């Protein structure tokens, strides 16, 4: 009986950790990817500075729900985190390669 209760508690904590990692990935990762998307679009769109920043910011708001959906649809919590990290790294590299704002 004790082993069965222990296994049940372990699965409850595993489930809670799974949800916690996915929630943090969705919130923090969503903010990070949205900020990098806005910066990348603001630096690379062929518009005036004000229009590029405004357009980039508006489009970045559409990225956050996509990251949140990805965080909860991925096969596992670590795969969701890895996917967000890869996207953020690619966006960060693009922002860095775009150079300083004009």
Image (cartoon, rainbow, N blue to C red):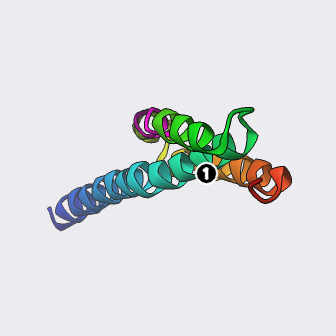
Percent x, y of residue 24: 39, 57
- Residue 91 located left or right of residue 84: right
Position above or below: 58 against 39: above
Instruction: Tell me if I can see residue 92 in this picture.
Output: yes
Percent x, y of residue 92: 71, 54
| Magenta stretch bounds | 60-67
Q: Residue at x 67, y 38 (%)?
A: 48
Position above or below: 33 against 96: above
Q: Secondary structure at mark 1?
A: helix
Q: Along the line of sight, which residue is nearer the eye, 97 or 77?
A: 97
Q: Quadrant of the N terminus?
A: bottom left
Q: Residue at x 28, y 57 (%)?
A: 16
Percent x, y of residue 81: 54, 52
Q: Along the line of sight, which residue is nearer the eye, 69 or 97?
A: 97
Q: Residues within 10 Å of mark 1 (few under 14, many from 20)?
A: many
**The stretch drawn in magenta includes residue 42:** no
Q: Residue at x 63, y 53 (%)?
A: 85
- Residue 85 located left or right of residue 34: right
Report which quarter residue 13 is drawn in.
bottom left
Q: Along the line of sight, which residue is nearer the eye, 31 or 87?
A: 31
Q: Residue at x 51, y 33 (%)?
A: 59
- Give the residue number, with chain letter if any, for mark 1: 36
* Magenta residues, dominant SS class: helix
Position above or below: 71 against 3: above
**The stretch drawn in magenta includes residue 63:** yes
Q: Along the line of sight, which residue is nearer the eye, 32 or 78?
A: 32
């Amino acid at each position: 009986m004790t082993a069965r209760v222990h296994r049940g508690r372990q699965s409850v904590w595993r489930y809670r950790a799974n949800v916690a990692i996915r929630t943090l990935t969705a919130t923090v990762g969503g903010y990070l990817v949205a900020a990098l998307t806005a910066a990348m679009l603001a630096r690379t769109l062929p518009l005036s500075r004000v229009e590029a920043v405004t357009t980039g910011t508006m489009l970045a708001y559409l990225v956050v729900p996509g990251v949140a959906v990805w965080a909860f649809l991925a096969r596992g919590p670590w795969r969701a985190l890895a996917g967000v990290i890869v996207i953020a790294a690619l966006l960060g590299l693009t922002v860095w390669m775009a150079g300083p704002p004009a």
